[in-house]
């Protein structure tokens, strides 16, 4: 049975987690779970875009809504660019559209966090299996 | 910028008009669907269309029924306290 070093395993898990963050479903794609990856990608991107459509890009507010922004950041690093666009453009959004938009985009981020953790867990299980009988 | 580009940009830079009324609660349904789909995707190791859709529909229904039951309970509670 071949053995793998702890550092190798940690690096692999880190890569899986990182890909899952950069592209929703990316972690599952690395693991060869293509169906999972496609479903996760489509669902999370659609949920996030619905939030942006309802409340406009102004719902990504890194200055006055930091806790929401942290959850939104879990979608992808691209949210940082959207936060910059929102800040420079001064897209104001209030009341119900703001609430619903923030909830949609933040829930999409938290769902992606769940998928990242799930991909890391499956990657860890796979590494624990015996190799080459 | 073409008309299509301008339309898409405008869609994401101007908020929708949503009023604070009972109808606005319907916006929770697509969100519940997304939660049910992603949650079931993480739980099922091998996805088969029929089985997956059935699981998602059951979870979606469970969440909606529980939320409606909670809303009714809270309404009754509020009515009992205020009457």
Image (cartoon, coloured by chain):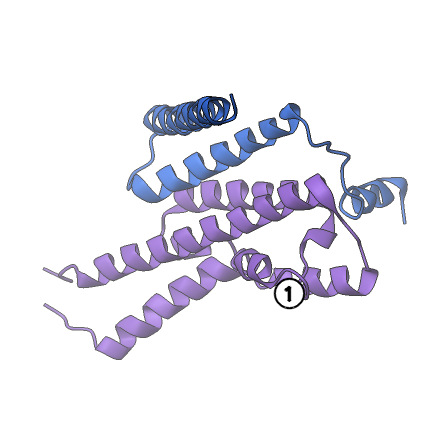
Chain colours: A purple, B blue
Mark 1, secondary structure of its residue: helix
Q: Residue at x 56, y 60 (%)?
A: A67
Relative to A24, is B57 on the left or the right?
left
Location of residue A112 in the rendering, given as x and y in whole percent from the top left corner? 47, 52
Q: Quadrant of residue A86?
A: bottom right
A130 vs A77, left or right, is left
- A80 displayed left or right of A24: right
Query: Taking B83 as reference, is A98 above or below it?
Result: below
Residue B79 in the image: x percent, y percent? Answer: 50, 22
Q: Is residue B64 above or below residue A88?
A: above
Whether residue A91 is visible, yes or no, is yes
State the residue at coordinates (57%, 41%).
A47
- The chain letter for the residue carrying disc 1 is A
Q: Which quadrant does the N terminus of chain A fall into?
A: bottom left
Q: Residue at x 69, y 60 (%)?
A: A82
Q: Quadrant of residue A27?
A: bottom left
The residue lying toward the viewer, choosing from A124 and A79, is A79
Q: Which residue is identified by label 1?
A: A80
> Which percent across, then down, holds residue A19?
46, 62
């Amino acid at each position: 049975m071949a053995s793998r070093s702890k550092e190798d395993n940690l690096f692999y898990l880190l890569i899986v987690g990182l890909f899952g963050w950069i592209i929703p479903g990316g972690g599952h794609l690395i693991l060869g779970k293509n169906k999972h990856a496609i479903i996760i990608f489509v669902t999370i991107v659609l949920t996030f875009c619905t939030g942006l459509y309802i409340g406009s890009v102004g719902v990504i507010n890194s200055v006055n809504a930091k806790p929401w922004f942290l959850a939104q950041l879990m979608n992808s690093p691209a949210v940082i660019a959207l936060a910059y666009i929102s800040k420079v453009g001064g897209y104001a959004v209030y009341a119900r559209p703001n609430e619903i938009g923030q909830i949609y985009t933040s829930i999409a981020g938290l769902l992606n966090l769940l998928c990242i953790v799930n991909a890391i867990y499956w990657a860890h299980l796979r590494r624990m299996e015996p190799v080459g009988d | 910028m073409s008309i299509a580009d301008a339309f898409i940009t405008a869609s994401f830079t101007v908020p929708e008009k949503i009023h604070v009324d009972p109808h606005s609660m319907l916006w929770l349904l697509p969100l519940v669907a997304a939660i049910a789909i992603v949650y079931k995707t993480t739980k099922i190791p091998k996805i088969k269309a029929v089985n997956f859709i059935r699981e998602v529909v059951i979870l979606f229904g469970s969440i909606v029924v529980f939320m409606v039951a909670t809303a009714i309970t809270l309404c009754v509670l509020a009515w009992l306290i205020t009457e």
